[in-house]
Amino acid sequence: MPSRNILVINCGSSSIKFALVNEGQSSFPLQGLAERLGSPEAVIHFESTAGKESVNVPDADHQAALAQILPRVEEAAGGHLDGIGHRVVHGGEKFFASTLLNEETLAGIEANIQLAPLHNPANLSGIHAAMNLFPRLPQVGVFDTAFHQTMPEHAYRYAVPDILYKEHGVRRYGFHGTSHRFVSKRAAEMAGVPVENSSWLVAHLGNGCSTCAVVNGESRDTSMGLTPLEGLVMGTRSGDIDPSLHNFLHNTLGWDLAKIDNMLNKESGLKGLSGLSNDMRTLTEARKQGHEGAMLAFEVFCYRLAKSLAGMACALDKLDGLVFTGGIGENSAVVRARTLDHLKLLGFKADDEANARCTRGVAGEIQAVGSPRVLVVPTNEERQIALDALALLDA
Ligand code: ADP
């Protein structure tokens, strides 16, 4: 049987990230990004073995952009596309695994809109556009939250009045599930430990950041909550703060909820602390030059990450290793080393040479002799989404 092709789509409110995944090839035959959709500057960037190309598509919406993307995808797939996998942000309590998309499951995604008012409608518009263009192709939804549906109640409940959970779904859901699932499985393979008898701490550190405790292939706790704002310091998100900050800012500065929400999501985190940038590369350079804001942001980021990982250890009976992934986790030896310094009580220590070697896609173990295992594992959410789609096609 020839190796099959899945198109993976991740729709934002004005963007579509896409990748053609072939089950027999490690790199993507075609990938790209459509951005500024709905505006006169709408553009699609394509990248393949043949090179890079950008095509202007003024005022294109999701469907118009997909209509431009799909012929190229079909060509790159040798005329044979087997299915489409859609990243969906919020599956609420309804979706604990990836699912074939049909009328019933689409209604389930719609029912979760109030939990993700910005993300789920964008994901849905991509799904509808793809279904209109390819009505006979199987389409699969893969949820950021689904992997965390195995969390025990003591991990997912907030200590607020019960009715808020029972009637309004106020609980911790967690995100980045596709990445935590992919890298924890990969870590087990790399370490030669059976997934079904393994325990991992995972730090996914990209623009958004989260930790996860993964036991026997299941999430037992994670740092993000009802929304992706909870937990670690991120590029522009604050992570945990005292919930009374809202009241304080309202009373002292007269800020309304929208202004506070915007500040916590868009102006905080590394960007807010450093006063310089949300980008860890920029901060790493500035820190070397002695930029005080960059030094502070770096220190708070690493300390809070270590604190979260130590807390996640409560969900484990044993530890097979700590996994770093995401743009920062895969590339920043200094973040990894500083974070491990804070975890010395748990015995963690980096081997400087091995730590420096694991960057730009190089995977491996970076612990010093005597330390619990520490792995750098590049994430690949697109491949995991394609694998889920293929598994559902096989079923
Ligand atoms: P996203 O969550 O948008 O997928 P990524 O996983 O690509 O983001 O991670 C982006 C982050 O990774 C940025 O903060 C970027 O600065 C950081 N990063 C990428 N390369 C390096 C590097 N060599 N050193 C430090 N940080 C890096």
Image (spheres, rainbow, N blue to C red):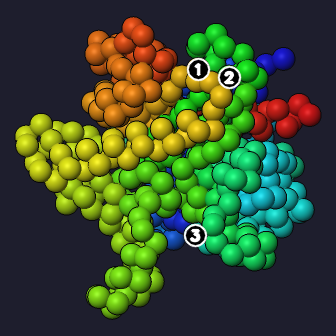
Front-most of residues 201 and 18: 201
Mark 3 element type = loop
The amino acid type of the residue labelled 3 equals: Leu
Q: Please say if 190 is above or below 132.
A: above
Mark 1–mark 2 contact, CB under 8 Å?
A: yes
**Circle 3 Cα neighbour tier, 10 Å, few/some/many (<14 / 14–19 / ≥20):** few
Count the numbered circles shown.
3
Image quadrant containing the N terminus = top right
Q: Quadrant of ligand 1?
A: top left
Mark 3–mark 1 contact, CB under 8 Å?
A: no
The amino acid type of the residue labelled 1 equals: Asp
Q: Please say if 322 is above or below 52.
A: above
**Which residue in the protein does label 1 denote?**
320
Q: Please say if 124 is above or below 304.
A: below
Q: Please say if 298 is above or below 383.
A: below
- Mark pair 1, 2: CA separation: 6 Å
Foreground mark, 3 or 1? 1
Residue 118, label in figure = 3
Q: Residue at x 33, y 63 (%)?
A: 268
**Circle 1 Cα neighbour tier, 10 Å, few/some/many (<14 / 14–19 / ≥20):** some
Q: Is residue 310 left or right of residue 278?
A: right
Foreground mark, 2 or 3? 2
Q: Residue at x 29, y 32 (%)?
A: 338
Mark 2–mark 3 contact, CB under 8 Å?
A: no
**Which residue in the protein does label 2 denote?**
198
- Mark pair 3, 1: CA separation: 37 Å
Q: Is residue 119 left or right of residue 109?
A: left
Q: Where does the image place residue 75, in percent across and percent down from the top left?
A: 65, 35
Q: Where does the image place residue 173, in percent across and percent down from the top left?
A: 66, 56
